[in-house]
């Protein structure tokens, strides 16, 4: 058996009869769009993270798009995004007419750097843009530095969209991601910590007005009358079948988050002398969407990854190129002092196999391979 980077089959094995039962129930009642499982799942999802409202949608990118539409981002607005992230975070900004401003991240957390955010806000203002909002990302499952970001947002009259596509259910100083930010979003792409069997996403808010706007925007901007569209919207709903599957996955999610802690703790204990292992700040808990390490100065990342592959251990680079160095994003404003950390991380990070069902014997194979490979240059 080859080792999986993320093993979805092991989880399916665990809950297969429950999922089969759920799918059968949907096929029987036939409400494929906005069936009862959607509302049931939304309620449980909101309860899980302590948010007032959760709304399903078609995917994590639409979740961000709908959030920006509800917050009325538009021309002249600067929306600050980390450069070291998946493209979705910034991709949703230009269609609203607003300008994404790419901000650097911290080396230790891989997450948005508040000092870089402050510099970028000042610089955006000098360029005639209005600082309007920030989209921190809970990269690899670790919450962003929300205390600092919330202070900066409050000082500058900005909203926060927490992009928790990778971090739903993580903990930040007593709060759970999903409940943080003016709006929070997540993705149920299969490989995310809470994934479905297709595309799916969700949007969270405590604000009833934003909730009402998002409910309208996700169904073509509907008004109280179905055929009176009050605004230009999207077709972006969570399928009933995906909600049904997610209900069973959410039921074991807390347990899976615990299992992820055990894998990460064993990796970190065994590997901290070989590579730079990830640091989780005090009072925080990651959901470990990825276990991402960095090579030391002088270590050759590609040689290490080749050595791992030869030992049957898959590894992946997330992300090989920060957004500001990608063709479509290179024209947007950035931190005026540059994004040295994002550029360095793109050259030095790699991620190891991580999922809740990774056996100790497979963990040991990964650990031995990294220990062995980290001396290879
Ligand atoms: C996966 C991801 C998204 C988008 O989710 P999709 O469901 O694939 O559209 C957004 N932001 C981040 C950080 C992601 O990792």
Image (cartoon, grey):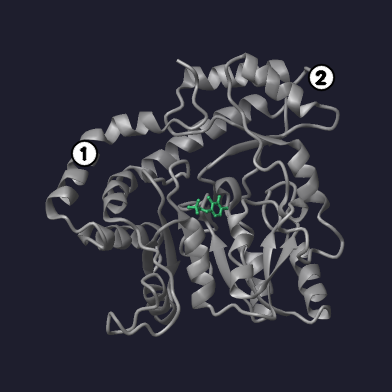
**Quadrant showing the C terminus:** top right
Residue that badge 2 annotates: 377
Q: Nearer the viewer, residue 6 or 173?
A: 6
Measure how far apart labels 1 and 2 are at the Cα level.
Answer: 49 Å
Q: Nearer the viewer, residue 147 or 318?
A: 318
Q: Residue at x 59, y 74 (%)?
A: 96
Q: Residues within 10 Å of mark 2 (few under 14, many from 20)?
A: few
Q: Is residue 278 visible?
A: yes
Number of residue marks? 2
> SS class of the residue under badge 1?
helix
Q: Nearer the viewer, residue 190 or 277?
A: 190
Look at the picture and state if 311 lies above or below 250.
Answer: above
Name which of mark 1 and mark 2 comes first in the sequence.
Answer: 1
Which percent across, then down, holds residue 113? Answer: 73, 59
Which percent across, then down, holds residue 205? Answer: 44, 71
Locate residue 52 relative to residue 286 in the image: left or right.
Answer: left
Look at the picture and state if 109 lies above or below 19.
Answer: below
Residue that badge 1 annotates: 20
Q: Residue at x 71, y 57 (%)?
A: 328
Farthest front residue in view: 227
> SS class of the residue under badge 2?
loop
**Quadrant showing the N terminus:** top left
Q: Nearer the viewer, residue 367 or 135?
A: 135
Q: Is residue 177 visible?
A: no
Which percent across, then down, holds residue 215? Answer: 37, 73
Q: Residue at x 34, y 61 (%)?
A: 47
Asked if the residues shown at circle 1 and circle 2 are in contact, with their CB atoms under 8 angstroms apart, the answer is no
Q: Residue at x 27, y 35 (%)?
A: 15
Q: Residues within 10 Å of mark 1 (few under 14, many from 20)?
A: few
Closer mark to the observer between disc 1 and disc 2: 1
Locate residue 264 relative to residue 111 in the image: left or right.
Answer: left
Q: Is mark 2 within 8 Å of ligand 1?
A: no
């Amino acid at each position: 058996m080859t080792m999986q980077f993320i093993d979805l089959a092991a989880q399916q094995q665990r809950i297969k009869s429950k999922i089969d039962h759920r799918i059968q129930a949907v096929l029987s009642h036939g409400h494929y769009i906005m069936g009862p499982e959607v509302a049931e799942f939304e309620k449980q999802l909101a309860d899980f993270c302590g948010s007032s409202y959760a709304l399903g949608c078609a995917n994590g990118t639409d979740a961000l798009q709908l959030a920006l539409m509800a917050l009325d981002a538009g021309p002249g607005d600067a929306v600050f995004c980390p450069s070291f992230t998946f493209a979705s975070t910034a991709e949703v900004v230009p269609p609203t007419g607003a300008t994404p401003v790419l901000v650097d991240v911290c080396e230790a957390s891989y997450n948005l750097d508040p000092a870089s955010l402050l510099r970028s806000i000042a610089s955006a203002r000098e360029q005639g843009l209005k600082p309007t909002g920030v989209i921190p990302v809970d990269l690899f499952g670790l919450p962003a530095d929300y205390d600092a970001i919330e202070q900066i947002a409050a000082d500058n009259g900005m909203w926060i969209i927490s992009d928790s596509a990778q971090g739903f259910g993580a903990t930040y100083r007593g709060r759970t991601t999903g409940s943080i930010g003016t709006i929070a979003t997540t993705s149920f792409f299969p490989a995310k910590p809470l994934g479905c069997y297709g595309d799916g996403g969700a949007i969270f808010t405590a604000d009833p007005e934003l909730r009402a706007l998002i409910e309208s925007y996700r169904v073509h901007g509907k008004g109280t009358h179905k055929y009176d569209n009050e605004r230009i919207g999207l077709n972006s709903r969570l399928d009933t079948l995906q909600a049904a599957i997610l209900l069973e996955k959410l039921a074991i999610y807390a347990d899976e988050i615990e299992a992820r802690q055990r894998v990460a703790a064993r990796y970190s204990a065994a590997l901290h002398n070989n590579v730079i292992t990830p640091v989780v700040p005090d009072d925080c808990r990651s959901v470990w969407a990825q276990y991402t390490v960095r090579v030391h100065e002088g270590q050759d990342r590609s040689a290490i990854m080749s050595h791992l592959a030869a030992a049957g251990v898959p590894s992946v680079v997330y992300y090989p190129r920060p957004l500001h160095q990608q063709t479509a994003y290179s024209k947007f404003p950035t931190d005026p002092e540059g994004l040295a950390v994002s550029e360095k991380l793109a050259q030095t990070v790699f991620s190891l196999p991580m999922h809740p069902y990774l056996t100790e014997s497979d963990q040991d194979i990964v650990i031995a391979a990294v220990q062995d490979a980290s001396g290879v240059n």
